[in-house]
Amino acid sequence: MYLSFYGLNEKPFNSTPDPRFLYLSPGHQEALAQLQYGILERKGFMVLTGKVGTGKTTVLQTLRRRLAGDTAVSYVFHTLPFDGLLCYVLEDLGITEPDESRVRRLIALNKFLIERERAGQNTVLIIDEAQNLDAATLEQIRLLSNFETATSKLLQIVLAGQPELKAKLDLPELRQLKQRVVLACQIPLLIPQEVPEYIRRRLRVAGAHDRNLFNEFAVDRITKYCGGIPRVINILGDHCLVFGYVNYKRRIDLQAVNQAIEYLEESIASPRRILSLGGWRPRRHFQVGSLG
């Protein structure tokens, strides 16, 4: 809807984990560098944590892009019991399942990893939202780290999740898994000074000619409201552009941000009102049905 009005090629504040839009704050950059180092050096178990909406999945997708072509990656984002997870990984890596036996599946995976090791290739298993896995499944995942040679790990494993993951790893029954973690990193919230650059970065990638499309008062209000959480910035930023568009505002000002915040707060208070403008009617002649 608002793309041509603001001279954009695409939506700058989509909530999808598109690596092109990743803003590398010092905290995000450090986490990404540590994970990349751990994988390339075949360190084995790694853990990435961060609060909801801080960009963990976007960092992981960027990591996948940065890994060399000789690194095979299985990315698991479903909460599955171990046998289901194992089937998913085999399918993801292109390994033909021998039969329904867990033992045979593990043998097939081990053979695949050995062959890749002999060819000088690496293999990575990334499990997102790992805080949702039960202790039994996490313990079985630990056993996958037993695939190794005398000098290196055959399978690099990254567990990513919310801060609850760290608490879960402190459980007595997972002490062996915690001992295997050789690298743990955390994605912090954006600090206030980083929010303006975060907004400009997303506008730049989306093709904006005016990088100051949000004036300083608007950015300041967004900064204070969103608490350094990129996902909240994205949701609010998208709504700001809609409200600016329907009110013929070529630049997003404080009024547009306040309108968007008011709408979002009402949506939270009323569960039937989802975070979109379906059902809302602007004061002018526009008919707003989607964010397109």
Image (cartoon, rainbow, N blue to C red):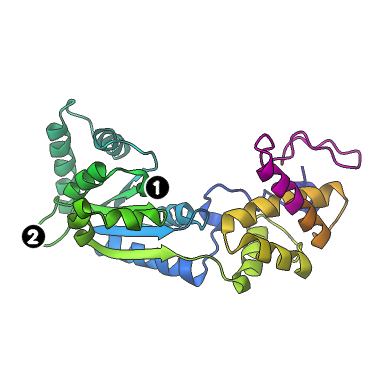
At a point 58% along the width and 58% down the height, the residue shown is 230
Label 1 environment density (alpha carbons within 10 Å; few <14, some 14–19, many ≥20): some
Q: Position of residue 43 (x, y in %)?
A: 23, 62
Instruction: Tell whether 222 sits left or right of 286.
Output: left
Residue marked by disc 2: 150
Q: Position of residue 59 (x, y in %)?
A: 45, 57
Q: Is residue 162 visible?
A: yes
Earlier-in-chain disc, 2 versus 1: 1
Question: From the viewer's perspective, is residue 109 above or below residue 122?
Answer: above
Q: How many marks?
A: 2
The residues colored magenta run 261-290
Q: Position of residue 91 (x, y in %)?
A: 30, 34
Instruction: Tell whether 248 sits left or right of 218.
Output: right
SS for dot 2: loop
At a point 53% along the width and 51% down the height, the residue shown is 18
Question: Magenta stretch: residue 271 in it?
Answer: yes
Which quadrant does the N terminus fall into?
top right
Please name the predominant secondary structure of the magenta segment in the image: loop
Q: Is residue 253 visible?
A: no
Mark 2: amino acid: Ala
Q: Give me the disc on residue 129.
A: 1
